[in-house]
Amino acid sequence: MPADPSTPQLELRDPRDIRALAHPARMAIIDALATGDELTATECAQLTGLSPSATAYHLKFLERYRLAERAPARDDGRERPWRATGRGGTVDLDTSTPAGAAAAAAVGLAYVDRSRALAEEFVAGERNEPEEWQDVAALTNADVWLTPDEAREVSTALAAALEPFRDRNLRNRPDGTRRIRVMTLLTPHPKR
């Protein structure tokens, strides 16, 4: 599916730069800023577990790659918050070389790891959540047969898009399909 020209796109070609995105502190900062919040290095440090100066280093790295930018100073003029450069943008990681593919895999696995940790935290404390938030976390999976184009389509759609494919099996699958495991994970972030 072609990228939406109205959303920002970052292209990373150097495997070292790609792999650098997989750093847990950077993932935490990207995650926090993706909500639209403007946070100082000190506020981001609380999320990363690092010192504010170490977190500032990671923010400057993200600024260099246009994933974060300095926001206007707060009212007192002393606090310098950061924000995401664009919500809904895409990052194109060059996987055309073995090193690039390995680096992109590291980023993807770091993202999955972060999502898993959020889910674990919510599930472990779910009984302490207000009643309306209990049983909100959902994990579903299905093995379906898809062509490469169908797999890309499904990856961008909601879980409801899986329904037309659930009846496919080894006996009635269309030619050119492969068995693809599709997982949808829905988990609230911890209350802050």
Image: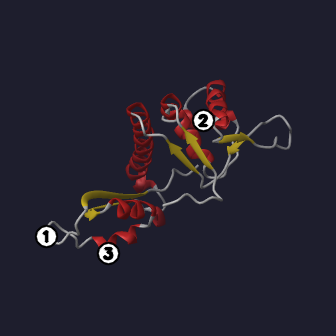
In the displayed structure, 3 sits above or below 100; it is below
- Kind of element beneath mark 2: helix
Amino acid type of the residue that numbered disc 1 sits on in the rendered structure: Arg
Q: Is residue 135 visible?
A: no
Residue 46 image label: 2
Report which residue position mark 3 lands on: 164
Label pair 1/3, CB-CB below 8 angstroms: no
- Left or right of 174: which side holds 164? right
Marks 2 and 3, Cα distance to the nearest angstrom?
44 Å
Secondary structure, mark 3, is helix
- Amino acid at circle 2: Gln
Residue placed at 63% from the left, 42% from the top? 67
State the image coordinates of residue 77 (x, y, percent, origin top left).
86, 37
Q: Quadrant of residue 155?
A: bottom left
Q: Is residue 78 left or right of residue 173?
A: right
Left or right, 95 with respect to 176, comes to: right
Separation of disc 1 and disc 3 at Cα? 16 Å
